[in-house]
Amino acid sequence: MKVKPVNIDILDLWFEINTFQCSYGRLTPEMCEKLRQRPSIKEYVSGNRKNLKVPFKPACCEKCNEWKKLAEEVYKKRKEFLKKQIIQNQQKGGVRMVEKGIEKGIEKGKSDKKKENIQVVSVDFAPAPELLEILKKKAEEELRPLNYQILWEIKKSLKNDGVLQ
């Protein structure tokens, strides 16, 4: 299986819409939230060492008061982007369904027979709910959205099997 090259323009667009720049680095609002939820070093030093997990909250996050404004800007950009996508798709004669922030395109009048380039796949975790919980936990620990964590785990597994290099 040959891996297709990455379209840098799409990545740049994703970063522009979904991240903001702060003193810690380029973050999504979800990553920022997870960082702010971490315990501080001050809590550890002050003796409140029960149930504290490492890693600690970055020092720049302790005094940050810009995160709400930066996160709101990202949410606004996401909403505007989705609106543009819906309008563009409607102008092309298609119907766009938006569910939980994930876009699924359904074109009118097109056959489902040729779906070689599937980019969105729904997975039913009902037969293995414990697997979903493990993936959610790992995604949280590694500061990845769940869909990227699933892709990461698949890629890692394929590399271990020797299918990918």
Image (spheres, rainbow, N blue to C red):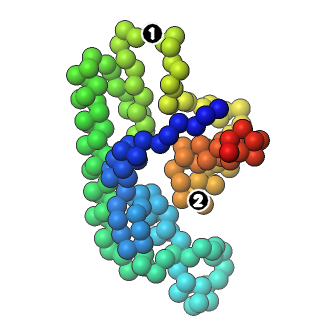
Figure label count: 2
Q: Which mark is residue 111?
A: 1
Q: Is residue 6 above or below residue 91?
A: below
Which amino acid type is marked by label 2?
Answer: Glu
Q: 120 or 62, which is in the foreground?
A: 120
**Secondary element type, mark 2:** loop
Image-based side of 89 in relation to 128, left or right: left
Percent x, y for residue 10? 38, 43
Identify the residue at horizontal 41%, vertical 68% (top origin).
25
Q: Residue furthest bottom?
A: 46
Image-based side of 127 in relation to 48, left or right: right
Identify the residue at horizontal 59%, vertical 43% (top origin).
151
Image-based side of 105 in relation to 118, left or right: left
Determine the image quadrant of residue 163. top right
Residue occupied by mark 2: 142
Q: Which mark is residue 57?
A: none
Determine the image quadrant of residue 19. bottom left
Q: In the rendered view of the protein, which quadrant contains the C terminus?
A: top right
Which amino acid type is marked by label 1?
Answer: Ser
